[in-house]
Structures are given as structure tokens and as C-alpha cells.
Amino acid sequence: MLVLTRRSGESVIIADDIKVTVISVNTKAGRAYVKLGITAPADLKIYREEIYEEIKRENEAASGATLTDFAALARVWRQMKGPGQGRSE
């Protein structure tokens, strides 16, 4: 892990197209809070760590489908298609 010291208004550049700027440093109830500004390409997904971990947990839970689940899904799908709309080969 790279550890840097930056003051309010100072920045760090990552891989030519990502800029992280310290917007402000405040203290609330004895705890320091840092407000960061991030400039990055629009297609780059940026999350707070706790949000990213929640997304990861949800994706892992959703990917826990079993063969039984897929078989049930296939049955429902075939029923929705109706008679006479089977596979075309």
C-alpha cells in the first residue's frame, strides 16, 4: 500500500486518467473526516468500500443458483411460450 500525505487542495494522479483531490479535512466529535473529489472516466465504477462489499455479497448470493433452480426456470419459460412454440431447428 502506498501511503501519501496530502493537504486540502492537493491531488494524486493514478494511471494518467484518474485524479483524486483532497477537498477538505474536518473534525467532528473528535474524529477526522476527509472529503475527496475523484475525476475519472465515466465508464469507471467508483464505490465507497462498504457499498462495494455489499454489492459483492449480493452478487455472490444471486450466483448461488442450483441446477434445480435452472430446471424450474426452464419449465416456467416453456410454459410461458405456449404450445406449438417449441424449439426451431
Image (cartoon, grey):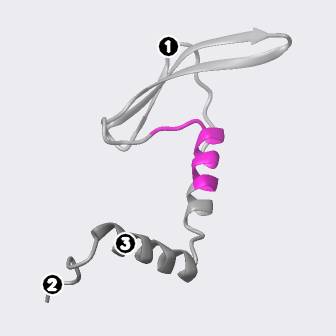
Sequence-first tag of 2 and 3:
3
User: From which residue to which does the magenta span run?
Assistant: 46-58
Residue reaching furthest to the bottom: 89
The image shows residue 50 at horizontal and vertical percentages of 66, 40
- Taking 65 as reference, is 61 above or below it? above
Q: Residue at horizontal 78%, vertical 10%? A: 28
Position of 27 with respect to 68 (left or right) is right
Name the disc covering residue 88, or none: 2
Please state the total of marks drawn on the protein image: 3
Q: Residue at horizontal 56%, vertical 61%? A: 62
* Residue neighbourhood size for the residue with mark 2, other residues' Cα within 10 Å, grouped as few (<14), some (14–19), many (≥20): few
Name the disc covering residue 79, or none: 3
Residue reaching furthest to the left: 89
Name the disc covering residue 56, or none: none
List the residue tagged with mark 1: 9
Residue reaching furthest to the right: 30
* Residue neighbourhood size for the residue with mark 1, other residues' Cα within 10 Å, grouped as few (<14), some (14–19), many (≥20): few
Q: Amino acid at mark 2?
A: Ser
